[in-house]
Amino acid sequence: MKKVHIWLFITKLLLFSNWAYTQDLVEKLIVIDSVHQKRDKKPYTIRFGLDLSKPLKTQFENNYFGLELVGDIRLYKEIYGAVELGNEQITKQSEQINFTTSGTYIKIGFDYNMYKNWKGMNNAIFLGMRFCNSFHKQEVNEYEIYQLNHYWSEEPISKGPEIGERDQLKAGWIEIVAGMKVRVFNNFYMGFSLRLNRLLSNTSPRNFDNLYIPGFNKKTDENVWGAGFNYTLTYAIPIKI
Amino acid sequence: MMNLRNLILLYFLGLLSCEKDDICLEGTPGTPQMIVVFKDYLDPSAPKGVSELTIKGFDQEANYQLFSGDSIAIPLRNNFDITQYKLILGAETETPIADSLQLNHKQFDIFINRACGYKSNYIFGDPAYYILTQGNGWIKNIEIIKDTLTDEKSSHLAIYH
């Protein structure tokens, strides 16, 4: 609007004779502007729910427990604040090591909705970003020694100084999120999102590594990138302001 | 809206099945073996090779190696504090001479990476070894050159004969 005003001001100076016409135009523009604002005013919506994929995986896999609560709130036009709060415990047999990772994580960020909704609807195709932190521990359960010579029989090592827990570990990363949310019935929404993660920092456990980070997923050797997804069911509470 | 829902379902099914594996790169140094050199008893600085030395671990079915030369890498036992080998000279002849050697060691494991896991390093105990056979064998003396096994770049034990 500011630019239009300046432009009109200039035309006003140039075209003294058309003063009345210009005045008329300005009034019209202001009217259009206020109509435009009215249309943009949607109810502020808070959505909350959970990631369905994690309880599902918990059911079908013995060595996994996971729960993730999700929520978002429409802050401004198409910008939503978003948060995910989760807890995971996973026991994995990697190539040589059997280990258990457990901990909680929090992801805070925003989504930008690119989907043009009809009035009153709140579906979304969005791009977003999250700042994430985990607080976790790693436990080595059993491991096999990496040997090139196999003359002596080798048994996995399940006791000794390396077996056991390394606690008070932290990790920080950012996620680029792409996804969608669709209303399925009443105020219930289903959605999925795909995440590309980039690890920024992590405390290394003693004589071990963060092979898995809750919320971040599998961490591979000398690689700061990871990926994840979630599949959410949320309930929306409309708040009219 | 139906289309979107189907898309979500399809996508979710597709995600269930892929995970990348790490591969332990060939040439990654693993658990080091003990490097044994054979030297002359009368002239300790001079290497003196053995010929047709049978090396066999205690309680093992198979021989480790039938060896000729003056330096060999021998694996220590993992998850045990001792490693016992029988060293037999001239096993095929009518008069074999056997010596048995026990090595005492402590093991500590070092994390390499996800794909390779852990490797072991060793420290020789005190005493580092026992010669288990009585009387005269072919081994005259044993010397510990290096009491920690962290790599295979230098020799750890010298056998004088």
Image (tube, coloured by chain):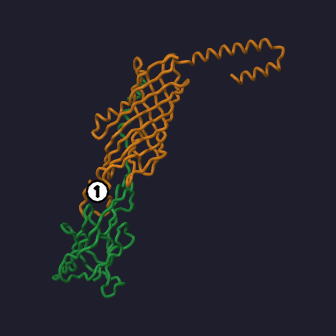
Chain colours: A orange, B green
Q: Quadrant of residue A2?
A: top right
Which residue shows up at 27% across the image and 73% down it? Answer: B127
The vertical placement of A152 against B48, above or below, is: above
Q: Is residue A102 above or below residue B122?
A: above
Taking A60 as reference, is A132 left or right?
Answer: right
Q: Is residue A39 above or below residue A126?
A: above
- Could you tell me the amino acid type at mark 1? Gly
Which quadrant is the C terminus of chain B positioned in? bottom left
> Which picture quadrant has residue A135?
top left
Q: Is residue A38 left or right of residue A96?
A: right
* Front residue of this view, candidates B1 and A41: A41
Residue B23 appears in the picture as rendered: no
Seen in the image, is A10 located left or right of residue A202?
right
| Tag 1 residue | A160
Direction bottom: furthest residue:
B42
Residue A92 place in picture, x, y as percent:
32, 45
Quadrant where the N terminus of chain B is found in the figure: top left
User: Which residue is found at the position 36% from the left and 84% from the top?
Assistant: B45
Residue B155, percent across and down?
Answer: 36, 74
For label 1, the crowd category at 10 Å Cα-Cα, with few meaning under 14, some 14 to 19 and many 20 or more, is few
Image coords of residue B137 (percent x, y): 21, 82
Secondary structure at numbered mark 1: loop
Q: Is residue A5 visible?
A: yes
